[in-house]
Amino acid sequence: MSTLLLVSIIVLAIVIWVFNLLVKDRNQVLAAWSDIDVQLKRRHDLIPQLVTTVKAYADFEQATMTAVFELRTRSQAAAHLPEKAALEDQMVSAIGALVVLAEDYSDLKADTNFRQLQSDLTEIEHHIQYARRFYNGAVKIFNIRIQSFPNVLIARLLRFREAEFFEVSDPAERHNPAVEID
């Protein structure tokens, strides 16, 4: 077997191996994003129930409820990760403001449906945080692989692009909304 043929086989094997690693890591990022998307959908599905329940007790707080619905609609329509992340961060604050309204209404705080919605929202927020951490971990691994030698050569050749982290855009919004049940 000639040296050139042997070198070609080794190079081809390395390219195939690196390509498979990149595909695996890219699919891990996509799967992790899907997990975030599922949790965001759960949150989005909960919002109408939460707003309706609060509205029954605090109808004059229309601006807060409208803001939550508008953010939900804009987030669902967002196509790019940074835009979606920023809208979701704003929604966390808006939901927190909506839940804080309950503090002014003792009947609402005592409402079984509202308390269940608070509990569900807290659970969803925990799942979202977990999914974000998992996604960002997958992005980190994928991006390191793309940036490392010799992978960088193959990744550029095959047009693999770095994935974006799901980051909180406003440092003041780096917390979960206050939805714990008393």
Image (cartoon, rainbow, N blue to C red):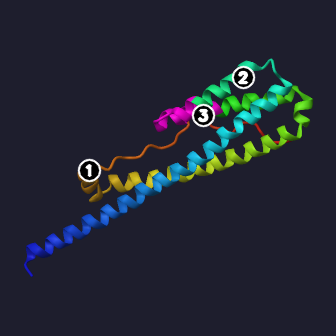
Are discs 3 and 1 less than 8 Å apart at CB? no
Name which residue type carries label 3.
Answer: Asp
**Label annotation for residue 89:** 3
Name the residue rendered at 74%, 19% in the picture.
62
Give the residues drawn in magenta, as a range.
Answer: 74-91
Q: Residue at x 66, y 34 (%)?
A: 92
Q: Is residue 169 visible to the viewer in this orientation of the structure? A: no
Report the front residue among 178 and 107.
Answer: 107
Residue position marked by numbered label 1 in the rendering:
156
Side (left or right) of 91 relative to 11: right
Residue 48 location, x and y as percent?
72, 33
* Residue 88 counted in the magenta span: yes
Q: CA distance from mark 1 to mark 2?
A: 47 Å
Q: Secondary structure at mark 2?
A: helix
Q: Position of residue 51 (x, y in %)?
A: 75, 30
The part of the image, by quadrant, that contains residue 42 is top right
Above/below status of 8 relative to 52: below
**2 horizontally vs 27: left or right:** left
Of the 4 image quadrants, the one containing the C terminus is: top right
Task: Locate the N terminus by quadrant.
Answer: bottom left
What residue is rendered at 9% in x and 72% in y?
Answer: 4
Q: CA distance from mark 3 to mark 1?
A: 33 Å
Closer to the N terminus: mark 3 or mark 2?
A: 2
Give the residue type that dot 1 points to: Arg
In the picture, the disc for residue 64 is: 2
